[in-house]
Image (cartoon, coloured by chain):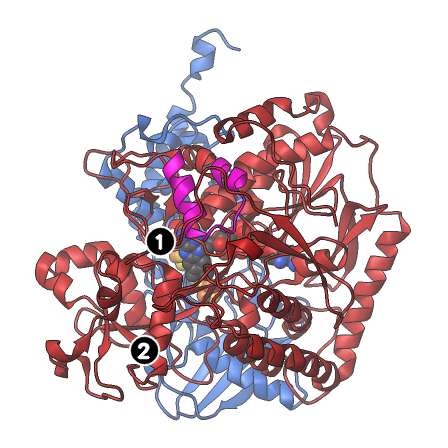
Chain colours: A blue, B red
Amino acid sequence: MNLTLHVWRQAGSSAPGRFETYQAKDVSEHASFLEMLDLVNEDLTREGKEPIAFEHDCREGICGSCGMMINGVPHGPNKMVATCQLHMRFFHDGDVIWIEPFRATAFPVVRDLVVDRSALDRIMDAGGYISVRTGSAPDANALPIRKHESDLAMDAAQCIGCGACVAACPNASAMLFTSAKVSHLGMLPQGQPERWTRVVDMIAQHDLEGFGTCTNHGACQEACPKGISVDFIAHLNRDLLKSSWKAAEPPASAVAGGR
Amino acid sequence: MNLDAKIPAGPIEQKWDKHRFDMKLVNPANKRRYDVIVVGTGLAGASAAATMAELGYHVKCFTFHDSARRAHSIAAQGGINSAKNYQGDGDSIFRLFYDTVKGGDFRSREANVYRLAQVSLNIIDQAVAQGVPFAREYGGLLANRSFGGAQVSRTFYARGQTGQQLLLGAYQALKRQVALGMVELHTRHEMLDVVVVDGVARGIVTRDLVSGKVESWAGHAVVLATGGYSNVFFLSTNAKGCNVTATWRASKRGAGFANPCYTQIHPTCIPPAGDYQSKLTLMSESLRNDGRIWVPKEAGDSRRAAEIPEGERDYYLERFYPSFGNLSPRDISSRRAKEMVDTGHGVGHMKNGVFLDFKDAIARLGQDVIAERYGNLFEMYEKITGENPYQVPMRIYPAPHYTMGGLWVDYNLMSTVPGLFVLGEANFSDHGANRLGASALMQGLADGYFVAPMTVGNYLAGVPREPVNADHAAFRDAEQGVHEKTSRLLGVNGSKTVDEFHIELGRLMWEKCGMERSGAGLKEALAKIPEIRERFWREVRVPGSGDTLNQSLEKAGRVADFLEFAEVMCWDALTRDESCGAHYRVEHTTPDGEAKRDDENFAFSSVWEFKGVGEKPELHKEPLEFEYVKLSTRSYK
Ligand SMILES: Cc1cc2nc3c(=O)[nH]c(=O)nc-3n(C[C@H](O)[C@H](O)[C@H](O)COP(=O)(O)OP(=O)(O)OC[C@H]3O[C@@H](n4cnc5c(N)ncnc54)[C@H](O)[C@@H]3O)c2cc1C
Ligand code: SF4
Ligand code: FES
């Protein structure tokens, strides 16, 4: 098939951007969307032009590197896939495709379709972990966990950190991403000790990074390649609410006479 | 080149404990005065950086990815082994050790493998405590499955995303240390040289991939955990960014490269669909637990699978290996598939695959059970091929997947350059000539969480505490080298793209140094590689500049390194005039076509010393001794 692409080109974070038009010729329906862009880039390079920069690595939907707006939709028209798993059989000969970077204040453009998503990493720094020193763990089967809870935690843990939820959200909120981690850790017994501070700290960082507030729009869930459910946002909100009195409870160490 | 493996004395089961006791300790108050550089944030790098920071060392960690969470480890699907024996099916540390030595076709170091099996227990404990949501049974205990060639169920898994969950666990531990100020994390930084001062590793040189800034970093020890080099074949299951640059450049600075020809081909990948193919996708090997592999008996048969009656199908693995059947080891399954395709029995529009059929399993267990076990893999297959594997058999074909070769390390994981440690897939590892399924995740985490933090500490206890800095002339020289290489790549201004060369090299390596190798073919490759390299430096076109994000430039640097490294691979494959594990020399086969080892002449690890680009590297040997596992011929009949 032959396609017309309008691609956002921007030389650097402070440089002005614009759409450029390219023709993608003889594209196989079995090719992936990124393989289609590879072909365009090969042609551009041979013509002495700079190829389109886009982020990618695993090309199997798990590393979370790839991601772009395809006709206004993060990761394109196929549900539950990252851009790298989108195949050209979802397009037709003669289609016109608009390709842009994920847009959000907290995701400055680095170049062309590449954006800086380090704000998501900083949300993780604020508390997206369970504090356990290497070598100090008890036997793994010492603490049985109901399969149902473990499965639910796994549902949340699947987030690949791609940022499509942010790009889809009219408020550019990263609530789906944040809730996935808060829920994954907060639903497991191992995650309880830090549960009430984790949610507060991660949300504080989320707001500090300039992500918007969640107004229950639901566009994030639609765009998420891993099908992370907005139910986790509800879970986060409940924890956030509870944290205000949980955090007020005296810590166990104080009751026991401090340390 | 000094290849003293420094294996501690004593019975194998006591070596590691004794060694740990004998190690020198760094006074806790002094630990923060030591700078440790860790390159790579995959399972090996992230776990090492986090643990060393917990211990109190000051860690500087680097990755070329935009986030530490994106390392290639994230893509591992199937699972991680551990000798927990939670299933009570007869597993033990010794059995895991035994299976790994035997699976590696007797080309690994016993002492290291035993330690790996020992610490495999701690890994699962650690991961669960971090919140890794491994699969569980209804009783709440951890679930296990059997995996590729093992007769016990010792594999732990998290749906088809085990690597992702383990990496997120290690990444989260790393993030905690970043927040505590114990780890300085530099993302989008590519390491382009190791700096050696007076014979000791003292730091690295990086290029900031966004600004192009070339910078030096000094440390008391340098740890490389930069993954494997399967992308030398261009098409592989590895992420596009995987490369040999870090280890190759270390090799050029004096680190011996061990067993580069040991590369593993994975039997169950989706076959290429066309010329534009950019990488290959692995379908987890766990599928072989329930799928049956077959091809049409008649060569050239173009009928659809459903039209081929049972009697006209050849379930060749079941036929050749009645006791292991579809679960035969990776190398054997891969070679047999190639043989089927080469003799005209291939299936699919390019006739380049074999069938993996779930029809019988669905009839026996029901579609629900199959969906519960493999649902996400089936979906992934359908997304890529547009075919529904519940209805038509999958098509699979072998693809390069993992590299057992890597920088040589002693028992302490230190390379031949003092102060330079190598972990994970980047070292020549514990897998000998062939790695068992679900053992790479185990090895990466064993190295990173439990081995390196101890052995690097032992090394640091013996070096002066004085702050190190990047003032030495060796840093300027290394920076200069990086600048020159960048300008050279940008300056060729030829007419061909980087990928054109990478594809050409990859095809050559796949044909001559891939699943099957012959002396004549390897010599051809050795003649051809310098010629491609020479053309690359004359005809490549790298657009753009060196002071912005330039993905063509990144790729060009990596392919330039592959073009040098490929020769060492071929030298290694040529001089190893035997077959063993994944290294299959057509000249050395048993009467029924299996790899035929030559223990009398080749029971050693080959360690190559760099002698100059295009020069024949020098071969050194580390003899291998087998005290606990008797040398025997593998038999999967
Ligand atoms: C598709 C697939 C499935 C797999 N499934 C399994 C499985 O089920 N079980 C199993 O045990 N194994 C599996 N493996 C193998 C296993 O995933 C890898 O061997 C292992 O994860 C490697 O980990 P690592 O930490 O050594 O390296 P990697 O995870 O590859 O990490 C390398 C790191 O180094 C960085 N890096 C590299 N070069 C540089 C440089 N020059 N400068 C800066 N940074 C650099 C990268 O950014 C990255 O952070 C699988 C492999 C593949 C390809
Ligand atoms: S929640 Fe979904 S869309 Fe958002 S970062 Fe995670 S995987 Fe991507
Ligand atoms: S490239 Fe890894 S998720 Fe798309």
Q: Chain of mark 1?
A: B
Point out the stretch of residues depicted in magenta.
Answer: B94-115
Q: Percent position (x, y) of residue B238? A: 49, 64
Where is mark 1, residue-wise? B78
Query: Which image quadrant for residue A256?
Result: top left
Camera-nearest residue between B397 and A257: B397
- Vertical placement of B334 versus B342: above or below? above
Query: Which image quadrant for residue B245?
Result: bottom right
Q: Percent position (x, y) of residue B259? A: 59, 58
Q: Nearer the viewer, mark 2 or mark 1?
A: 2
Q: The residue tagged with tag 2: helix, strand or loop?
A: helix
Q: Inspect the image, locate mark 1, and give the three-letter code of the amino acid beneath it.
A: Gly
Where is mark 2, residue-wise? B340
Q: The residue tagged with tag 1: helix, strand or loop?
A: loop
Q: Percent position (x, y) of residue A51? A: 61, 80
Say whether disc 2 or disc 1 marks the residue closer to the N-terminus: 1
Q: Is residue A61 visible?
A: yes
For label 1, the crowd category at 10 Å Cα-Cα, with few meaning under 14, some 14 to 19 and many 20 or more, is many
Is B244 within the magenta? no
For label 2, the crowd category at 10 Å Cα-Cα, with few meaning under 14, some 14 to 19 and many 20 or more, is many
Magenta segment main secondary structure? helix
Disc 1 residue: CB within 8 Å of ligand 1: yes
The residues tagged by marks 2 and 1 sit, at their Cα atoms, a distance apart of 26 Å
